[in-house]
Image (cartoon, grey):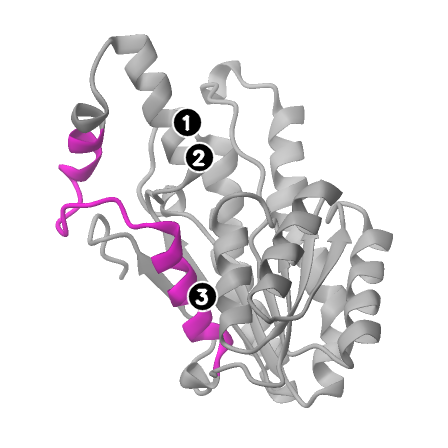
Amino acid sequence: MLLENKVAIVSGVGPGLGRATALALAREGAAVGLAARTEERVQSVAGEIEAMGGRAIPLATNIVDADDCTRAVAKTVDAFGGLDILVNSAFRGDGGASFADADLAKWRKVFEVNVWGSLQLTQAAVPALRQRGGGSVVFVNSMSARKIRPNEGSYASSKGALLVAVRSLATELGADGIRVNSVIPGWIWGPNVQLYVDWQISERGVTQDEVIAEITEAIPLGFIPPQEDIAEAILFFASDMSRVITGQSLDVNGGEYFGV
């Protein structure tokens, strides 16, 4: 039980990586605060964790709202007695417009969630982490910030800002025993990629195997990393296995991109 007697908050708990992360942390003994905008979704994941003998509290939370962030931390501390781990998994995607044609107001909305929302929730968590003598903050980043593709400017730029923020926060919060790291997935096999594959099948008349082959051609390991495997990398940073690691960003993408 790597996280026995630990308390965590996971933001962005949907059907994908946020859920997989929450289940992995609970499996290792953590009590988990489940934060997402849709209350039914966090209620459902809380039920899954409780069914496996774990402890969880659903937190209907919009991380863009500062009061929501403060309430999410307070409810978790009240329910479980403290806070040791924060996983920032909430995100907003890119609409896919080229920069020349983009509405920069939409860029701001992406930054509002991916950068300001994540930082806002982290700031709200710092006092509780300090009270426990330290802890771990993990940001879920994206290979989009490493491997730049056209028409993803707002998303890639927001995630690039978080790469620098992780190092800055690690430098400032280290004296409090708070470690700050990020996991950088590439393709993640889960509901979102399944939707993309289904769309390609519909648009192009190809098979699922053909779409997956196109994706995995650039992945040396030859398969799309499942969301459960990405969650294990997050678990590593959340646990004391990484207690001397901070300010680091770990690429978890099957070898599609090698970070330097």
Amino acid type shown at disc 3: Ile
Amino acid type shown at disc 1: Leu
On whether residue 120 falls in the magenta region, the answer is no
Nearer-the-camera pick, 108 or 256:
256
The residue at the point 80 percent across, 73 percent down is: 79
Question: Along the polypeptide, which appears first: circle 1 or circle 3?
Answer: 1
Which of the 4 quarters of the picture holds residue 114? top right
Q: What percent of the width, then of the height, locates residue 53?
A: 59, 71
Q: Secondary structure at mark 2?
A: helix
Nearer-the-camera pick, 79 or 243:
79
- For marks 1 and 3, give the CA distance: 24 Å
The residue at the point 36 percent across, 47 percent down is: 143
Q: Disc 2 marks which residue?
A: 192
Q: Disc 1 marks which residue?
A: 195
Q: Which residues are magenta?
A: 212-239
Residue 125 drawn above or below residue 230: below
Query: How many residues crowd around disc 1 within 10 Å: few (fewer than 14), some, or many (20 or more)?
Result: few
The residue at the point 18 percent across, 28 percent down is: 209
| Marks 1 and 3 in Cβ contact (< 8 Å) | no
| Marks 2 and 1 in Cβ contact (< 8 Å) | yes
Q: What percent of the width, then of the height, locates residue 157?
A: 49, 41
Q: Disc 3 marks which residue?
A: 234
Any mark on residue 25, and which? none
The reply to whether residue 55 is visible in this rendering is yes
Residue 54 drawn above or below residue 131: above
Nearer-the-camera pick, 43 or 217:
43
- For marks 3 and 2, give the CA distance: 19 Å
| Tally of marks | 3
